[in-house]
Image (cartoon, rainbow, N blue to C red):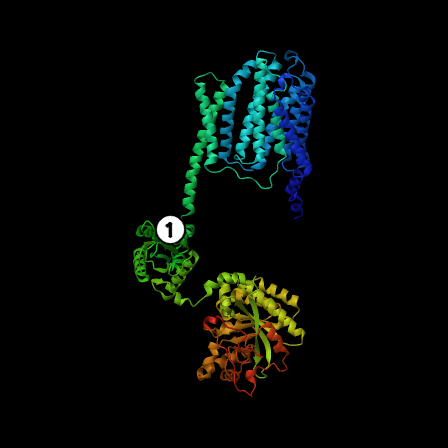
Amino acid sequence: MRTSRVADPAPDTDLTVLGSPVYRAAKISVGTLGVAYALSTLIPFDGQRPAFLDTWFYSAVLVATSLLALARPILVRHNRPAWTCVGAGIASWAAGDIYWSANFASAEASEIPVPSLADVFYVGLYPLAYVGFIVLARATVRRLPASVWLDGVVTSLAVGAVFSAVTLTDLLSSSTGGALGETVTNLSYPIGDLVLMVVAVAALAMVRWRTDPVWWLLGLGAAAFAVADTAYLFGLAGDTYEDGTWIDGTWMIGLVLMALAGSLFRRRPVDEVKGFAALLVPILFSLCALAVLIVGTLVPLHPVSIVMASGCLVAAGVRTALTFEQTRELTRTRVEAATDELSGLGNRRVLDSALPGMLGSLPPGAALPLTIVSVDHLREMNRTLGYTAGDMILHTVGSRLRAALPGDAVAVRLGGAEIAILRTVAAGTPESIGRDTALLLRSLGGPVTAGPVPVQIELSAGVAIAPGHATSSAELIHCAADALHEAKANRSEVEIYDPSLRGDLSSHLLPDLLRAVENEQLFVYYQPKVELTTRRPVALEALLRWRHPVYGWIEAEPLQRLAAQVGLTRQLTRVLLLSAMQSCATWRRKGYDLGVAADISVADVLDSHLPYDVAKMINKVGMPPAALTLEIAEEVLLVDARRTATALGQFRHFGVRLCLDHYGRSAPSLTRLRSMPVDELKLDPSFVEPMVNSTQDAVVVRSTVELARSLGMPTIVEGVASPDLRDAVALAGCFGVQGGLSGEPMSADSLQSWLASPHRVPVEYQPATGQHHHTQAGPGGWGVDPAAGRHR
């Protein structure tokens, strides 16, 4: 982290330097002086051009331009190597020109030695500029695809072909015939300019012709240099060059443009040219190369021009072939990305893209049924026949579906064994759509050869119709999934979504539950466990409840089912345990010797991290381990005995008490009960309620209580809501009860008042009234107000 803090501020620091008033003033001054000198070369002055313009003023502008170019790498770290090369190249050329002006300005052309020290500095610009341009381009674009490299080759060769066709033949012919050193020196300028143009254009192609003024200033500066050098050499060949002409002004403009390019800095990267515009650039340059070849058939051109133009067209052909292959590969990739490999149908992306459009363009009076078809028992067939057989079944169903549906229908595989069908119906009732769906399932459900013998497959379908059932994509899919669930539950072939049957809100509440923890909508309530002999509370069970902003209070059991569907069981268990232990530690410090109990699921029991997390919580809150009782669902008896015993033994190792909850809800195993390392047995209401009116059931309960007592387990009966049941379980020998009769669940605030009461005996137990209070929960446990029936 320390390294990142040092590295991150660099761009801001660079921007501060380049945007400082001093730097901006220097930039404006250099630009103004350079433009002023260039304009002065265009003024006639009636044949009497002031001498100072081409002596000390010209040299001063060159020095200022060089200093501005070198200031960039000295003051700014960003792309320092590239700008060091560019600045050194500008300074090298400026030093050569100042040396030439000081020593040869008034000499005759025949008296100027070639090569001289000025030529060394002049030519020094080229390799430094080449390196700077390439390094800067690679720093801008880290990874270059083959298409970008080819664009660079095409454009640079085209520019080289045009430039060499216009200048190279005449310049080379005028540069030969002298001494070797003079010939090499004179050839270095046109060749250097040719390579400079090629490198500049290649660099622009590498950065994909970005609309960045930095690159365009560099490119224009290189072009100005090439034009000035070419005109200078033609002037020397014709003995027409004079100081202070537009050629000197063009040189100055080229230097100033490249220096000003280094003074610019953009905080955000600019967009590159994309789409047809990116292809248009190499096409235009290819046409220029083709024009050079056509001209070459009419007039003699230098072989370099012909070779470069030919190479440009070859590279353009390779680029065209690459573009064609990339387009074909992109098309194939798009098809594969939207196709399910097993069924040959579309995948979820197709449905997500098609459904909103079809909903938005639904004609008046038309309907849009979404049908989700499921291959029943596919998991069992995979387990029995192998996954190859399951893949063959899905492939066959997909093939039959493509043959049965009209062309405008959309069929996609959602995943697993489910396939979605989307089609627009001009007119139709839910009944007719249901009949059409049933006919479709019959055409899909024939035998499938997926092994030694044909397999008869069974299909179920749920249908939701827009706009009647839903007007949004997500809601329509949700309704169709609900209808499919209903079809499977009823073992019916086709079910049309029925809004009146939406009694189970669980699936619609799942997204809200994911946000409930952050929104602090979960609360812990406490319900007392009362000893029957003394009618005094011995512990409190912690229950996690959710206060939904729309549906109100959601009880512990449906909340546990919801949490299991979205993978929040472990997180909510830890929220419940920590809150319960903190409350228990608080009331024990106040002198109330009461324990706390909390439900944990089978998944929690098998969570190897939970025992250690519980131990950490106990140490954190400072309560005795034995004050905590973990109530384990009876379903733990169905899990492997060895794994269960090992997992429960870890809790026992830390001193936590264990209780087997909901005993008797299913068919309990007395043998497993004997081997379970639990401290307490909690009987389910469905197990004990029949004993009030049945002597036989009373004997069964009494036997279970006696067995638990012989194993050292006290028995607690939950859900006791009537005095008759309380008296019956007391007669059977049960230790305690829990339920509405002994006290409804209380919030943390109500619990403090209840603990502070002098007797803490529920109102229902006071003999003066002889009545009890019981609050019935709503259907499925939804919308219950936990404040109702609370002990006061």
Name of the residue lying farthest toward the bottom = 768
Helix, strand or loop status at disc 1: loop
Q: How many marks?
A: 1
* Residue closest to the eye, 741 or 200: 200
**Above-or-below relation of 712 to 504:** below
Q: In the rendered view of the protein, which quadrant contains the C terminus?
A: bottom right
Going by the image, does 104 lie left or right of 713? Answer: right
* Residue closest to the eye, 329 or 498: 498
**Above-or-below relation of 284 to 447:** above
Residue with the mark numbered 1: 343
Q: Can residue 89 be seen by looking at this rendering?
A: no
Residue 536 in the image, given as x and y percentages of width and height? 59, 81
Residue 24 in the image, given as x and y percentages of width and height? 66, 36
Mark 1 residue crowding within 10 angstroms, few (<14) / some (14–19) / many (20+): many
Residue 39 in the image, given as x and y percentages of width and height? 61, 25
Going by the image, does 370 lie left or right of 549? Answer: left
Q: Can residue 611 be seen by looking at this rendering?
A: yes
- Report which quarter residue 485 is drawn in: bottom left
* Residue closest to the eye, 240 or 234: 240
**Above-or-below relation of 160 to 1:** above
- Report which quarter residue 367 is drawn in: bottom left
Residue depicted at x 31% and y 62%: 431
Of the residues shown, which amino acid type is indicated by label 1? Ser
* Residue closest to the eye, 791 or 685: 791
Residue 165 in the image, given as x and y percentages of width and height? 50, 20
